[in-house]
Image (spheres, helix red, strand yellow):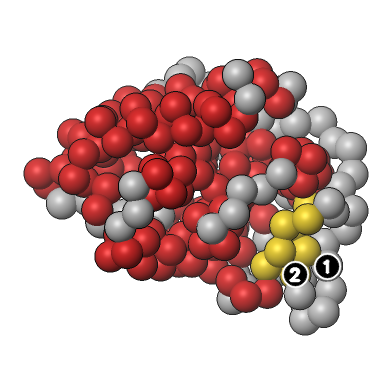
Amino acid sequence: MPRLQILRFAAAVLACAAGAATAQVAPSTSLAEQMRAMLGKPAAVGVAPAMPQAAAPVIANGAPQIRQSATELAQRFPAQHRAAMTKAFEESFAFWQKLETQLGLAPNDVGAATAAFIAGNYAAFMQQQVPDDNFKALVAQMQGTLARNPGISQASPAMKRQMYEQLAMVGTFMAVYREQLKQKPNPAEEVNFRNAAKANLEAGLGLAVERIQIGPQGLVYR
């Protein structure tokens, strides 16, 4: 199944899973700030990150904790919506695993999940899908960045697993929910959705969203 068809199918499933809860998409700023700590300081003005370099993936080899990861993310939502959002994040992770296979990515790769978080929020804010080739360049770039960060290599297996699952969950959810809003436009939800994506990107990268671009080189700071 082509990637866009997977996202559209996922959108239909998540619409049922999340229901009215998705009317108020909360930013994942705490998770984004953890990601920023992994990535290090942003580039200086006018400097783009290096071209993607081959690097061994940082694999989340801890025991899966999908329900716990989804439940923690859902705590950002009003109490009456948390069960629905837990299910929505779990469904998002299942679709991420399908995309991993479809795109030929290494399973359980923290770098790929980081790329998913960035690309999903970027697609949500910019209202356009990130092409597969550009996404793969972003994955390679994040793999190289994380491989050079001693903090991530020293992280416990449980911490790496949590970051992998939650980054993938949020990134996929944002990409999928964008497809849902395309199918069923709602201006009020769109404003909240794009604001959440903007907050996630700026907290995760430490830069104004207007300076961020994803292209053939991966992530570039303008």
Q: Earlier in the sequence, mark 1 or mark 2?
A: 1
**Amino acid type of the residue that numbered disc 2 sits on in the rendered structure:** Tyr
Q: Quadrant of residue 53?
A: top right
List x then y, in percent, for residue 102: 67, 21
- The residue to which callout 1 is attached is 48
List x then y, in percent, for residue 56: 81, 31
| Distance in Å between CA atoms under marks 1 and 2 | 5 Å
Verify CB contact (< 8 Å) between mark 1 and mark 2: yes
- The residue to which callout 2 is attached is 221
As helix, strand or loop, the secondary structure at mark 2 comes to strand
Count neighbours of disc 2 (C-alpha within 10 A) and say few if under 14, some if 14 to 19, many if 20 or more.
many
List x then y, in percent, for residue 207: 62, 73
Label of residue 119 in the image: none
Quarter of the image with the C terminus in it? bottom right
> Residue lying furthest left in this view?
80
As helix, strand or loop, the secondary structure at mark 1 comes to loop
**Amino acid type of the residue that numbered disc 1 sits on in the rendered structure:** Ala
Left or right of 87 in this view: 91: right
Image: 136 above or below 178: above
Quarter of the image with the N terminus in it? top right
Image: 74 above or below 63: below
Q: Is residue 164 visible?
A: no
Left or right of 171 in this view: 140: right
Left or right of 127 in this view: 70: left
> Residue lying furthest bottom in this view?
45
Which of 137 and 36 lies nearest the eye of the viewer?
A: 137
Q: Is residue 47 visible?
A: yes
Which residue is depicted at the point 53% across and 27% down?
A: 6
Q: Quadrant of residue 111?
A: top right
Which residue is depicted at the point 51% across and 33% down?
A: 7
